[in-house]
Image (spheres, grey):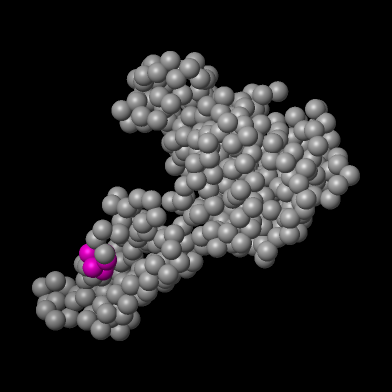
């Protein structure tokens, strides 16, 4: 079976995760796919297949070589983003000859080259698209399909490989994919998430990330007699935001540049709340940005009175680079495998995070491989069938190369 055929099957399962429920997994429906994947892994003959109480799927393909080599792993996530619907996903194959793609005739929805010029790189290839009303969930079911198909190839063609650990995780999109990941149970010394974009993308640098809640407490008094007594929390909240560095926002930054991003602002005279995320690739600059928020809070408290502004910052994840760089052969291994398949590695800093960034800090160095998809989290998401075949080959190739190489020591 080709990777895209598996993908079409998985895509039909609605698996949106949810920030609201507080359960693990966050939605029951992810378990439906988890069980299906576990069954497929069992049917293929993998060992120690398990869906655990948090909805993680684990499995192992035992080594078929006599030599001692590293136990590597591959990881993909099962959930899809809540930014686009997962209800009634209708995938469709398009032989792409260039130009705009009509996704939905009835609703006149087009995937336009003017919006997504890179789609034209796929002229002459086959794309999988939605009907313009849902995402397709190539993020990250394309990754699951590629890992599964690579396992099938390794088994059916009896290709040399060491022990390979596989995990499919829930709740990546709500930032909880690594929360209940059991690195010891997984067993691998290092791993790759297969959760990136276009063919060739290889990532091992991501943002340092924090969330920040700013709470403002005001004093509400009848405006007619408010002179020198009212403290308008909504106005103070707006002022707080206006005093942040103006150019350090997502819409004015790119590449390695960090930002603060105002997610929401709510409130009235009595109280108000600002919710931010803070991001930077550079750890020192990241700390500096967080400090700025705290100092601004203090400054405004001296102006408006102690206890007016409370700044609460919580770190979310860190740049995996500092962990992966100690074991850079993990990245080199992927690059070499790509080149030997005629894929030019495109190494780029992720302006976000992956499960791999947190796993890297949990003792499992974990760069991110491409999936062949694009426009993730959107109704205009698509994935390239031919890229999926190539990425499946890439996974097989990495497994083969590891089996042929001596066991590398990992630095913690
Ligand atoms: Zn993803």
Give me the residue at 59% from left, 58% from top.
Answer: 324
Vertical placement of residue 366 versus 382, above or below: below
At a point 61% along the width and 55% down the height, the residue shown is 328
Magenta span covers which residues? 240-244
Where is the C terminus found, in terms of image quarters? bottom right
In the foreground, 6 or 126: 126
Residue 86 on the magenta span: no
Residue 235 position by quadrant: bottom left
Give residue 149's position: percent from left, percent from top.
70, 31
Regarding residue 204, the answer to whether it shows in the image is yes
Magenta stretch secondary structure, dominant: helix
Say if residue 171 shows up in the picture.
Answer: no
Q: Residue 265's spot in the image, x, y percent?
A: 31, 59
Answer whether residue 241 is magenta in the image.
yes
Outermost residue toward the right? 66
Percent across and percent down for residue 141 are 60, 36
Q: What percent of the width, then of the height, locates residue 368?
A: 57, 47
């Amino acid at each position: 079976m080709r990777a895209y055929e598996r993908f079409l099957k998985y895509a039909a399962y609605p698996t949106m995760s949810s920030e609201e429920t507080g359960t693990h997994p966050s939605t029951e429906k992810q378990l439906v796919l988890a069980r299906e994947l576990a069954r497929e892994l069992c049917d293929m003959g993998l060992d120690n297949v398990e869906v655990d109480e948090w909805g993680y799927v684990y499995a192992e393909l035992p080594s078929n070589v006599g030599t001692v080599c590293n136990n590597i792993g591959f990881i993909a996530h099962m959930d899809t983003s809540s930014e686009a619907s997962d209800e009634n996903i209708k995938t469709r194959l398009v032989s792409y000859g260039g130009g705009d793609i009509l996704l939905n005739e009835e609703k006149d929805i087009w995937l336009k080259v003017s919006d997504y010029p890179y789609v034209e790189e796929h002229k002459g290839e086959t794309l999988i698209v939605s009907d313009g009303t849902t995402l397709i969930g190539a993020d990250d079911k394309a990754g699951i399909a590629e890992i599964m198909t690579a396992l099938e190839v390794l088994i059916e063609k009896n290709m040399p490989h060491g022990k390979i650990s596989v995990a499919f995780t829930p709740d990546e999109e709500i930032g909880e994919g690594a929360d209940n990941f059991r690195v010891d149970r997984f067993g691998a010394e290092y791993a790759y998430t297969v959760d990136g974009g276009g063919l060739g993308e290889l990532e091992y640098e991501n943002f340092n990330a924090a969330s920040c809640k700013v709470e403002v407490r005001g004093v509400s008094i009848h405006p007619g007699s408010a002179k020198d007594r009212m403290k308008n929390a909504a106005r103070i909240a707006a002022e707080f935001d206006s005093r942040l560095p103006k150019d350090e926002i997502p819409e004015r930054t790119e590449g390695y540049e960090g930002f603060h991003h105002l997610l929401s602002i709510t409130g009235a005279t009595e109280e108000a709340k600002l919710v931010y995320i803070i991001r930077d690739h550079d750890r020192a600059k990241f700390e500096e940005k967080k400090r700025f928020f705290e100092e601004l809070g203090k400054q405004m408290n001296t102006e408006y009175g102690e206890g007016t502004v409370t700044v609460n910052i919580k770190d979310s994840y860190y740049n995996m680079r500092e962990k992966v760089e100690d074991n850079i052969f993990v990245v080199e291994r992927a690059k070499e495998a790509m080149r030997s398949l005629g894929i030019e590695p495109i190494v780029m800093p992720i302006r976000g995070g992956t499960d791999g960034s947190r796993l890297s800090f949990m003792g499992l160095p974990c760069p991110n491989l491409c999936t062949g998809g694009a426009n993730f989290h959107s109704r205009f998401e698509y994935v390239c069938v031919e890229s999926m075949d190539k990425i499946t080959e890439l996974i097989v190739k990495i497994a083969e190369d590891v089996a042929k190489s001596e066991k590398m020591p990992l630095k913690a």
